[in-house]
Amino acid sequence: MSVIAPNFKLSKFIQSLISDIVWALMIMTLIGLPIIMMVLFFIPMPVIDGELLTPFLAFTYLADPSRLLPIVQAFMTTDMFKVMAFPGFGFAALLAAGTIFVERKMLAKLQLRVGPFYCGKFEGILQLMGDGLKLISKEIIIPAKADKPIFWAAPVLFVASAAAFVALIPVAPGWVVADVDMGLLGVFAVIGFFPIVTILSAWSANSKFPFIGGIRALFQMVSFEIPLILSLLGVVMVTGTLNLSEIAASQSSFPWIVFLPVGAIVFFITMLAELERIPFDLPEAESEIVAGWLTELSGMMYGLVQLGTYLKLYAFAALFVVLFLGGWNGPMIVPPLPMEIATHGMEMGPVTVKISGLEPLLSQVITQEMLNGTLWFVLKTVGVIFFILLPRGVFPRIRVDMLLNLGWTKLIGLAFVNIFIALGLLYAGVLGPGGLQ
Amino acid sequence: MADAVFLALSVITIGSAIAALEMRSLIYGSIALMGTLGGIAGFFFLLDAPFVALFQLAVYVGSIAVLILFTVMLVKRELIFKKIEDKRRKFAGIGLMLIIMVSLGAIFLDSGIKTITTDEPTVNFRDIGTDFVTYYWPALILMGLILASSVTGALVLARREDVENDQRIN
């Protein structure tokens, strides 16, 4: 006798099944068909692969799923896909989520702890999902005398700035959301928005710990923006362009870190400061000022700020890769795609399976170069992210006067040294026209 | 399309400029000032000058507005500002502004700006750079010296002598 359903009766079960089917058919006829008609009458449908895309055509995809491929291809070339999925938000958010888990686990291993362990069968692999569900289900508490409009808007603005930053990063040849001529200047402009959002969020909470944290963040970000911009000027000088795609493409034989190591080191240190990571995590110093400027944020507002922070981390690491490590350039390690299967079909004994829409998809959208570029880009970015995470397990936090001294004297001086190295390389003829690249 | 964007940008710029002056809260006033500066950056985008527009964003919104915001937050305004509310002064100010705007507009319209037609390509920022290092190099060097001296002066002024030596790093 079943314990789970003691009153089970087969006749009742069949009756309920039939009733469900009748209801589904009725809803389909009364609501679904009128909706299809309305769509057909009022919305201009796209023509894909010589066929007008109609809802009735969509029913045939149930019988032959391979007919979906042209639609997938058409969708992958739209701007919407670029913004939402591949070089844009979805891709970056996936890497950011991976970063959060790897950071927690790696930090725990460095400190001889276990880290996330119980969520999920293997090594707490589902911890992130659990944390996300927890943050969504928690109440959002607004401090009583907070400035409510700014307090509500700040996390959203933070994520928006981070997403704008991500949009400027080229991942593979031609795969970039916003391919602007002034990409690097756009990056500088977007970086300038983070301190504004931070200080506004900190001020609007009307609490002392966020305010102290916000002022520290402002000090740190504004004073480290100068060496950051100066350290990147060397790359602009040797490439002669501000377009990030062109900068990445210009490093086909040498990455610029070979010639401009000083600039790369300065940029890496300023990157740590801009990201508020240890040893520069004064704005969030949890042992001094609770959680810094994040103290009063709760629930999904905190979740949004965390998402923005890790998107920013990905974007900075990707910018380092694009500017100094050669972007998507690398040896071709992805094997050639199986084009004969796409064109002639796959023979399995007497049966030949041919998928019709595969050939244009493989030759135009998902090409070998794109896969290879993405692979190299992701590998390099993950490496840089690893080096950003590593100091958290090694270094203590430094004092604010040491931080400002470092930024204003040492890093700016080194950035100028880097500019003179770049100028010397150009004038000596090592780089530039007639030189190596 | 461009006209609609231009109108929207004008409304944002002028509206937030008025808001920056009239807001009771200094913080909201400085946020409105950021809106004004961002709107001006939008005008530069419309004029096909993204170089200037992005510098406007990076410098004015990213640095100057942040400095203003920072100063405003650390100030108790009751200690500094006394409210002088005077209807006559307000109307006199509005009248003066209108006179200046109307006369400036009259001068602009009279100057023949309507009849100018441009078919020339937009100026590339590389050309500006080339001009700076070839024909206008004395101006560039002068600007560089002025900036360097001001940065040095700021660093000297910001140096604190009263900090004990053992508190310093190194």
Image: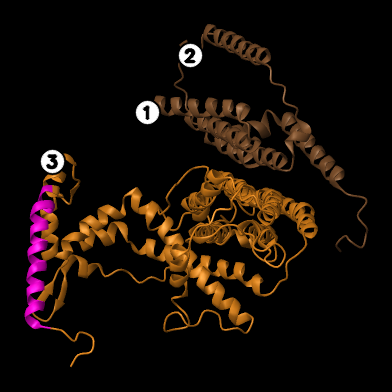
Give me the residue at 14% from left, 48% from top. Answer: A35
Disc number at residue B1? Answer: 1
Tell me where residue A134 appears, x and y as whole percent. 46, 68
Q: Which quadrant: the N terminus of chain A?
A: bottom left
* Mark before the other along the chain sequence, 1 or 2: 1
Mark in the foreground, 1 or 3:
3
Residue placed under numbered mark 3 in the picture = A41
Image quadrant in which the C terminus of chain A is located: bottom right
Residue range of the region highlighted in magenta in the rendering: A9-34
Q: CA distance from mark 2 to mark 3?
A: 48 Å
Identify by letter the chain in brown.
Answer: B
Q: What kind of element bears circle 3? A: helix
Q: Which label sits on residue B116?
A: 2
A32 in magenta? yes
Q: Is residue A95 above or below residue A247?
A: below
- Label 1 and label 2: CA atoms lie apart by 22 Å
Q: Are marks 2 and 3 on the same chain?
A: no
| Residue A24 location (% of width, % of height) | 11, 62
User: The residue tagged with tag 1: helix, strand or loop?
Assistant: loop
The answer as to whether the residues below labels 1 and 3 share one chain is no
Q: Is residue A21 left or right of residue B7?
A: left
Q: In this view, which residue lies farthest toward the front?
A: A7
Residue depicted at 26% across the width and 59% down the height: A361
Q: Amino acid at mark 2?
A: Ile
Up-down: is A148 above or below B134? below
Task: Check disc 3 and give the amino acid type.
Answer: Phe
Element at badge 2? Answer: loop
